[in-house]
Amino acid sequence: MPTVDCDPEEARRRLEESGVEVEPGNTEHERWRATQGDATAVAYDGKVVVQGARPTDLLARLESRGGRAHVYFDGASRGNPGPGAIGWVIVSSDGIVGEGSETIGETTNNRAEYEALIRAVDAASEFGFDEVDVRGDSELIVKQVRGEYDTNNPELRERRVRVRELLERFDRWSLEHVPREINDRADSLANEALDHA
């Protein structure tokens, strides 16, 4: 079980600011507890202990982070349009600090790619990174967001605006197209979500 030596009230503030609900502790020694995904954080005097199958769901939010992260995203649609899913991974010098996947209903491949990008960048912001290098294997989406391609579809235009708003939260950001093999973890997460839908 990872332990974060910190001021429990500062840790509580970080969690609440990132949208995690904090509840009272279950015993007289617990100051508070919070659950996110497959992780539960329990605060004691001078430390927070993180339990569960995926402690990274909370660890990145608890630690004083800042710094730079590499963010990978991928969306998938079987049928185009058809059942869709997204996957994303956030990597720092400490390794994978967060990842996620979920089904998103009936959609096109391009809409799924945008949804994956939005979720990935939003998560990196919640984790408190100052700089992000975002990578995806959809050249169309990357070039639309960077302004190199026009976006004629109104729904995709709205998503492009949302991505740009999220990216502006960072001190510095980049967005690059990469081959699928470099984006394999995000791709696998999206496809696993579809396989288990």
Image: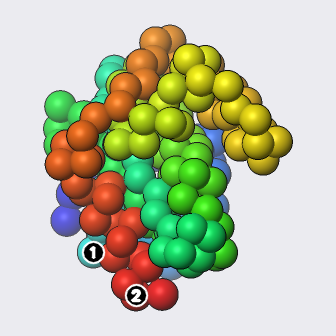
Q: Are marks 2 and 1 in contact (CB under 8 Å)?
A: no
- Residue at point 61%, 18% (across, down): 147
Give the side of residue 160 with respect to residue 46, left or right.
Answer: right
Q: Tell me if residue 101 comes above or below residue 164 in the rendering.
A: below
Q: Position of residue 40 (x, y in %)?
A: 41, 69
Q: Quick one: label 1, few (<14), some, or many (20+) residues within 10 Å? A: few
Q: Tell me if residue 103 comes above or below residue 97 in the rendering.
A: below
Q: Secondary structure at mark 1?
A: loop
- Going by the numbered disc 1, the residue's amino acid type is Ala
- Going by the numbered disc 2, the residue's amino acid type is His
- Residue at point 24%, 40% (across, down): 179
- Mark 2 or 1, closer to the camera: 2
Furthest residue toward bottom = 196
Give the side of residue 53 with respect to residue 165, left or right.
Answer: left
Q: Position of residue 31 (x, y in %)?
A: 50, 60
Give the side of residue 54 with respect to residue 121, left or right.
Answer: left
Q: Which residue is mark 1?
A: 53
- Residue at point 32%, 59% (across, down): 187
Q: Position of residue 54 (x, y in %)?
A: 30, 67
Q: Alpha-carbon distance for marks 2 and 1?
A: 19 Å
Q: Which residue is mark 2?
A: 196
Residue 69 bears which disc, if any?
none
Give 147 or 60, whichever is nearer the viewer.
Answer: 147
Give the side of residue 118 with respect to residue 174, left or right.
Answer: right
Q: Position of residue 17 (x, y in %)?
A: 63, 41
Could you say which quadrant of the image residue 64 lies in?
top left
Give 6 or 64, whichever is nearer the viewer.
Answer: 64
Can I make out residue 44 in this image?
Answer: no
Which comes sooner in the sequence, label 2 or label 1?
1
Q: Tell me if residue 117 comes above or below residue 149 in the rendering.
A: below
Q: Secondary structure at mark 2?
A: loop
